[in-house]
């Protein structure tokens, strides 16, 4: 029985073992299957980590042991598993400045947080500096105590460098925008401000934070509903169109003053091409407008008296003359000259003389009708244009006589200056207009002639221009005939006046024409240029000057004298000849000379006629290097517009301003303005008519280093030029 029992028990055990073995076999098959699946997943995970450059790790806090993945080793440049890497070794690879940040982040996460992330730098085995992004999660035990930390690190060097570069560019851009000399702002499509630069905030006295939190137009235009609505309408117009939208506004800045602004708005679009907002630029043009207004005023007015100047008055005279011809109604031009006025300047000084001149202008202005005009031509010469004084010439003459006597009596009253009384007498010339075969320019000449007749009559008198006084006209006709022969008989010659730079010495010469008259001797341009202009002889004369001037320049070059430029005046009639450009180019080609040796001096009247012809001629000659300057700048209808638009090289300050810069504050201001304007526009500058060291010193001190005038040299024959250049030492080298 015992044996049977033992055998039975053995069979049971064997059965149980067989069952378990069968189950184990099945489990083994399952495990083999699962192992295949897990390996596939592990391969996918490994590839993901390799591509994304992520490296997992686990830190067992209590044992202070870190399990590093192979990717961590590879990230640091080591062979995976080549050594036991502890936490201390990893911290030694962290960039020194970042170590405290890593430790603090870890402590903070263990104390108060479960998940944390940060970025820091590490050094690889080869010393390469990488940026790492760490993300980790703390796992705690049942008591809430940190048990272990699972983390993953990813190299983000390229992204970080891009971010840092972007931040640096953003910082630089902000620095540029905040220091730009203009207001700049950015707003979205709904009108909300997104950015305002420092200049605009300071101008309006409002911090950026406030700007970005308010309806800015309501703050900029407090109580001005129309201005607010206009600005909003302007924004809508900008958002609806391409290209810049320009407007001009006046704002009161934080300094309490009104400022003129030029505002440019440009709409912005996003990547999809949709409108996202606009950018605005505001430039304070207050000083520019003041300068333009000053130049405009000085172009039309006399700087001392505030009356119209010669150029503007002549223009008005021509218009009035044309109206008088159409309406058959007479006018009169009264020419006033103060007798012996030079003695006042010589004995009492220019300051007393200027005060008397201002008072003369005021008296004439107070004693004429509203429709009449008063101007100062220069020096002590004043003119009054009386209009609508009668259709009958006899009646008009009587009224002109009456007006002249009234104004003469007003000037005979003593002038009180600096507590002293000064008595002066005027000589008055009167010319009626319109007359038969008379032009507007003739009216002024006739009045001038009549004034000198008054002086010849004993001064303090009134004289009319009469037909019997045609001797002067006949003389001009004789001059015209003789001048025509002079061109044909080679009686003309050129003299040359050196142009001086304070530092380098002689930089060039200006060619000046002279007439060697067989009976009258040497005749200067002032005695025949006007006749040449009126008769058209200025064209062949101008061509003669160009040809002979360039021939002389080439001769000097052959003799070893290298001059920077040869300056030649060009008359309006010559410049407007259809063949002018080809003539100049032909001369340069014929003489094999570079165009940049030739400087053509144009008057402002040529430049102000900004026709396509004028611009194209200048540009055509600029293509071969010819230089252009404005002669007698400041005496015409000065305009900043043509200075910006035409390709000019140099301005010549007129000698009428230079001659009084040390004694006349108005001329000094004008010269300073011209110098500053030329520098701002990038134009060279030369002052003509410099006759004293004081004038030269004033010009140098205010930024003009190029001169021409009697202080340095008078115009001289060609044979004297080389001798002068060899002997001349620069001004600054003489000191």
Image: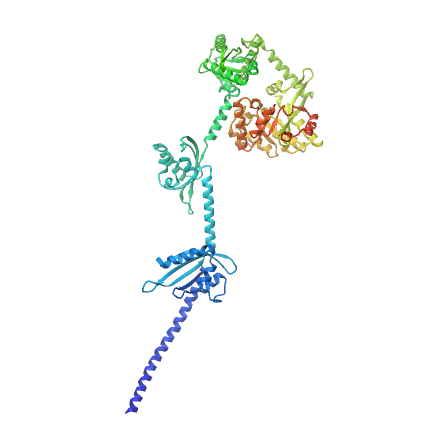
Residue 134 higher or lower than 29, as above or below: above
Residue 36 higher or lower than 482, as above or below: below
The way the protein has been coloured in the rendering is rainbow
Residue at left offset 48%, top offset 61%: 76
Residue at left offset 49%, top offset 28%: 291
Query: Residue 540's spot in the image, x, y percent?
Result: 64, 23
Residue 331 can be seen in this image: no
Q: What is the residue that sits farthest to the left in this orientation? A: 1
Q: How many marks?
A: 0
Residue 480 can be seen in this image: yes
Which corner quadrant of the image does residue 650 belong to? Answer: top right
Looking at the rendered image, the quarter that the C terminus falls into is: top right
Looking at the rendered image, the quarter that the N terminus falls into is: bottom left
Query: Residue 309's spot in the image, x, y percent?
Result: 51, 20
Residue 241 higher or lower than 26, as above or below: above
**Is 101 positioned to the left or the right of 658 in the image?**
left
Closer to the camera, 37 or 275?
37
Which corner quadrant of the image does residue 211 belong to? Answer: top left
Residue 423 higher or lower than 46, as above or below: above
Query: Residue 56's spot in the image, x, y percent?
Result: 42, 62
Closer to the camera, 393 or 499?
499
**Is 590 positioned to the left or the right of 391 in the image?**
right
Query: Residue 36's spot in the image, x, y percent?
Result: 41, 70
Closer to the camera, 280 or 110?
110
**Is 430 positioned to the left or the right of 65 in the image?**
right
């Amino acid at each position: 029985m015992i044996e049977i029992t033992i055998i039975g028990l053995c069979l049971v055990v064997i059965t149980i073992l067989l069952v378990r073995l069968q189950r184990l076999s099945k489990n083994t098959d399952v495990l083999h299957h699962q192992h295949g699946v897990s390996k596939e997943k592990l391969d996918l995970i490994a590839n993901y980590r390799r591509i994304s450059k992520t490296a997992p790790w686990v830190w067992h806090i209590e044992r202070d042991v870190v399990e590093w993945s192979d990717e961590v080793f590879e990230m640091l440049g080591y062979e995976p598993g080549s050594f036991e890497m502890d936490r201390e070794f990893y911290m030694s690879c962290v960039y020194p400045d970042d170590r405290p940040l890593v430790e603090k982040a870890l402590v903070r996460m263990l104390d108060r947080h479960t998940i944390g992330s940060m970025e820091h730098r590490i050094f690889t085995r080869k010393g390469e500096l990488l940026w790492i992004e760490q993300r980790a999660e703390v796992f705690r035990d049942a008591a809430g105590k940190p048990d272990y930390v699972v983390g993953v690190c990813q190299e983000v060097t390229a992204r970080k460098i891009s971010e840092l570069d972007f931040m640096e560019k953003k910082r630089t851009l902000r620095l540029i925008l905040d220091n730009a000399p203009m207001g700049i702002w950015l707003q979205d499509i709904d009108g909300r401000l997104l950015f305002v630069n420092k200049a605009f905030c300071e101008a309006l006295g409002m911090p950026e934070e406030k700007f970005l939190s308010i309806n800015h137009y309501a703050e900029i235009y407090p109580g001005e509903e129309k201005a607010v609505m206009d600005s909003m309408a302007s924004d809508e117009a900008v958002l609806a169109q391409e290209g810049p939208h320009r407007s001009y506004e006046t704002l009161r800045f934080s300094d309490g003053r009104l400022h003129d602004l030029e505002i440019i708005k440009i709409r912005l679009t996003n990547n999809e091409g949709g409108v996202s907002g606009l950018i605005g630029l505001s430039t304070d043009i207050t000083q520019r407008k003041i300068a333009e207004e000053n130049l405009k005023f000085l172009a039309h007015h006399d700087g001392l008296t505030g009356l119209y100047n010669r150029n503007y008055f002549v223009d008005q005279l021509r218009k009035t003359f044309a109206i008088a011809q159409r309406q058959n109604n007479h006018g009169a031009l009264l020419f006033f000259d103060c007798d012996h006025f030079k003695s006042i300047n010589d004995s009492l000084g220019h300051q007393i003389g200027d005060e008397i001149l201002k008072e003369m202008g005021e008296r004439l202005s107070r004693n004429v009708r509203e429709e009449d005009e008063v101007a100062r031509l220069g020096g002590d010469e004043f003119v009054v244009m009386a209009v609508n004084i009668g259709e009958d010439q006899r009646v008009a003459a009587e009224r002109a006589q009456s007006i002249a006597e009234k104004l003469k009596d007003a000037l005979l009253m003593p002038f009180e200056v600096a507590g002293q009384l000064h008595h002066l007498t005027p000589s008055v010339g009167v010319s009626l207009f319109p007359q038969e075969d008379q032009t507007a320019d003739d009216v002024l000449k006739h009045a001038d002639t009549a004034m000198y007749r008054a002086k010849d009559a004993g001064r303090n008198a009134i004289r009319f221009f009469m037909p019997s006084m045609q001797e002067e006209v006949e003389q001009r006709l004789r001059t015209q005939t003789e001048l025509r022969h002079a061109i044909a008989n080679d009686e003309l010659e050129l003299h040359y006046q050196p142009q001086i730079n304070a530092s380098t010495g002689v930089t060039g010469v200006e060619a000046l024409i002279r007439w060697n008259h067989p009976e009258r001797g040497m005749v200067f341009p002032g005695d025949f240029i006007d006749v040449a202009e009126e008769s058209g002889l200025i064209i062949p004369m101008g061509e003669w000057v160009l040809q002979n001037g360039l021939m002389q320049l080439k001769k000097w070059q052959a003799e070893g004298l290298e001059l920077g430029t040869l300056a030649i005046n060009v008359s309006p009639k010559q410049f407007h000849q259809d063949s002018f450009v080809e003539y100049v180019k032909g001369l340069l080609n014929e003489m094999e000379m570079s165009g940049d040796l030739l400087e053509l001096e144009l008057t402002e009247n040529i430049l102000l006629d900004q026709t396509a012809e004028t611009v194209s001629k200048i540009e055509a000659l600029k293509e071969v290097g010819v230089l252009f300057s404005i002669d007698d700048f400041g005496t015409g209808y000065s305009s900043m517009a043509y200075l910006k638009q035409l390709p000019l090289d140099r301005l010549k300050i007129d000698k009428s301003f230079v001659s009084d810069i040390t004694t006349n504050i108005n001329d000094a201001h004008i010269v300073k303005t011209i110098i500053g304007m030329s520098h701002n526009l990038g134009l060279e500058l030369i002052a003509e008519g410099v006759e004293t060291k004081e004038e030269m010193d004033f010009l140098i001190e205010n930024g003009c280093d190029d001169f021409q005038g009697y202080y340095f040299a008078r115009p001289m024959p060609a044979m004297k030029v080389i001798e002068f250049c060899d002997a001349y030492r620069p001004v600054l080298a003489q000191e």
